[in-house]
Amino acid sequence: MSNENTNASAAEASTRREYMKYGSAVVAGSLLAGCVDHGSDPRRTATEPATNATSDGAYAVTMEPTGTVAFDRVPETIAGCDPTYIDMLVALGHGDAVESIRTRRQYLTTHYDELDGVSIDSSSLTQLASKNGGVSKEVFYEMDADFHLMDPHWLTRILDSWSNADVEEIAEGVAPFLGNVIFRRTDPWHDYRYYTLYEAFEKVAAVVRERERFEAIRSIHEETVATIEAELPAADQRPDALLLYAPDDPEEFYPYRLSGEGANKEHFHTLGIADAFADTDVSGFSTSDSGSIDYETLLEIDPDSLLLRYRGKARTREAFEESIVSHIREHEVGGQLSAVQNDQIFRGGPIFCGPLHNLFMLERYAGLYYPDRFADEQIFDRDRLASVITER
């Protein structure tokens, strides 16, 4: 490449970053000095404006913990980490802007196959996490994205890979961060505001200036929820469940708390599935608690159903049945579980669940838990949803 072309490329990258320099400074000044002051309740859910616009077309988006980021135009390239947020960008018609993901295996995309014209090439995304789980700053410099759609605590807490100084360096030298870890609510370090799935989705819509598309998808979601809630049995007739991670050929399980909220549990709440751990002292999985439980504990609780998340060999439904469900059925204690005897063992769904995932999960579990009311029924219109996403 000639020096002239090299200089032109550098100037273009510098200009592209310049429009968010103010936002980057805000990030460095608020997040990395420590948690901002939230008053009496650091996890409050008071309404924030989704976006603030000025007469010259510039706009700003505010989201804890990073504060306010100012934009002169919609980012053309966006570095993502959590598949929850990438699913939001796909829903808003900006999947082509996505540059990266934490790990590709965590991003389930088969639901896009049911939406005509909706897709993303996840194989082309830069994988942030290395084999040892760490993340190199060089990857961020190489991507040179316009914007980082991720909570920096992904890097400093969950991946335990970066220092605050590393975050500041990338925020100031490449592009700002905006995002919030919302997939679970069990981490003690998350002492700042949480957002529901659609509160976070609204923030992302503000970043990419897709308010109309967001409202259309929210309408589909609200209609879907209303349809389901109108058909649910009385509260005392609804089942409970244990949500667990199950390794291959499981001899122990890692618990999640259905009652613990988080974006990947919102569909279970809508369906009225109770947390069978409710009257126990079992905690949900977090960065500070990765304890396991055995079959004897499962039998003592004896839930109506099991919701099992998994990795390893069980990448398909058939493999799930062979390497996990069959093992539980044949286990001396596992075979005594009511959920096993009543054939109420289900896959637990994705750990990272964006708004499109959420719609499919609502429909899937409505049919599994209430087959007499929702069996083989499409609760939301695929063509309508696809049109919202793809129309320009």
Image (tube, rainbow, N blue to C red):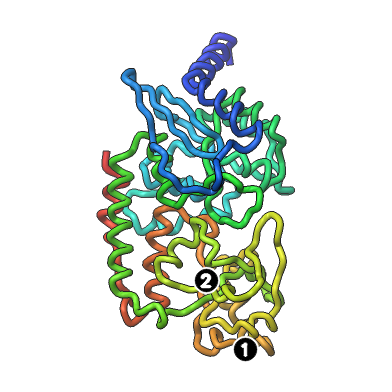
* Residue at (69% x, 45% y) in the render: 130
**Mark drawn on residue 335:** 1
Residue 144 placement: quadrant: top right
Q: Which residue is denoted by mark 2 in the rendering?
A: 347
Residue 15 higher or lower than 342, as above or below:
above
* Quadrant of the rendered image containing residue 260: bottom right
Left-right relation of 310 to 135: left
Where residue 120 appears, as percent x and y from the top left, is: 44, 46
**Considering depth in this image, is 215 or 7 the residue closer to the camera?**
215
Which residue sits at x=56%, y=70%?
243
Residue type at mark 2: give it.
Answer: Arg
Q: Position of residue 292 (x, y in %)?
A: 71, 70
| Residue 177 placement: quadrant | top right
Q: Name the disc covering residue 364, or none.
A: none
Residue 218: tell me if it is visible: yes
Residue located farthest toward the right when viewing the structure as drawn: 132
Quadrant position of the C terminus in the picture: top left
Q: Is residue 74 above or below residue 47?
A: above
The image position of residue 250, as x and y in percent, is 68, 75
Q: Please tell me which of labels 2 and 1 falls first in the chain.
A: 1
